[in-house]
Amino acid sequence: MAAVLTVATPGTGPRVAGWNWPAPAANGCLRWANSLDTDSSLVERCLGGDDAAWEDLVRSHTRRVYAVCYRFTGSGAEAQDLTQDVFLRVFKTLGSFRSGEGSFSVWLLRLTRNLLIDNYRRGKQERATDSIEEQLPMLEEKYSLSSRTDGMLAGREASEILQAALERLSPELRETLILRDLEELEYREIAQSLGVPEGTVKSRLNRGRAELARILRRFKVAV
């Protein structure tokens, strides 16, 4: 299988197999555009050296990988870099995927999650966390109930506040909320992706939602 991962010219953003990076959706919900049979077939063709199959595989899964990376980091540029890193790792380890042990999408999400946690542990989130801490007073003042009588934010402003709140959660609570409430995965899929029991997923989800609501109340956002 020949490598086809490329970097775009300056100003256009990086590309994987000619795929232009999508902007994150406002609601964070991006659908998984594939089926188990299609993925299994594409993987087999990739391992057989079919470059077109690799491009199709990347194209089918880039949006969700990028969305998860963006929601976890809060940075479009960092999400682009991490998404490229994910597919580089996929390219190197695709032979380890076993269709009999689960779907490719779950395998890919597990790989993405592990890379995000590795990135977090290397301390690359420190600057983003510091930045959020510095912005808290400004955000609280800007979005106080005195300036918004209905206490609600709309559109882009709501998305920005949600992202800031997500980044204040612990990694384990953040990833669970992203996969369930933003990516709309089933509990079983989340459990497989994170390597934990479904009961643990539900517990983290309840804790994460409660903590997120508490943070949003600090921003004076109605929840």
Image (cartoon, grey):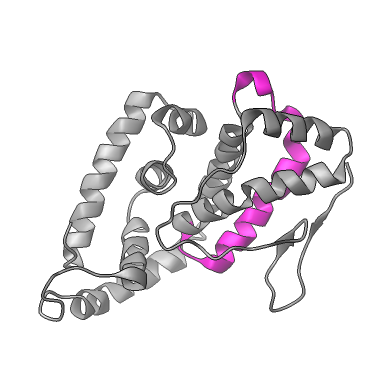
Q: How many marks?
A: 0
Q: Residue 101, how many percent across, how many down?
A: 62, 20
User: Which of the two residues, 92 or 59, is positioned nearer the viewer here?
Assistant: 59
Above or below — where is 222 with respect to 197?
below
Per the image, is 87 magenta?
yes
Q: Could you tell me which residue is drawn at 24 percent across and 70 percent down?
A: 153
User: Which of the two residues, 162 or 51, is positioned nearer the viewer here?
Assistant: 51
Instruction: Determine which quarter of the picture holds residue 79.
Output: bottom right
Q: Residue 202, how many percent across, how many down?
A: 31, 31
Instruction: Determine which quarter of the picture holds residue 127.
Output: bottom left
Per the image, is 13 magenta?
no
Q: Could you tell me which residue is drawn at 21 percent across and 74 percent down?
A: 140
The quadrant of the picture occupied by the C terminus is bottom left
Above or below — where is 85 with respect to 132?
above
**Magenta-tinted stretch:** 73-102
- Does residue 208 appear to the left or right of 93 in the view shown? left
- Magenta stretch, main secondary structure, is helix
Q: Residue furthest top?
A: 100
Instruction: Determine which quarter of the picture holds residue 147.
Output: bottom left
Above or below — where is 115 with respect to 135?
above
Q: Could you tell me which residue is drawn at 19 percent across and 79 percent down?
A: 141
Q: Residue 118, how many percent across, how many down?
A: 55, 47
- Does residue 2 appear to the left or right of 208 in the view shown? right
- Does residue 60 appear to the left or right of 48 in the view shown? left
Q: Residue 19, how many percent across, how many down?
A: 71, 59
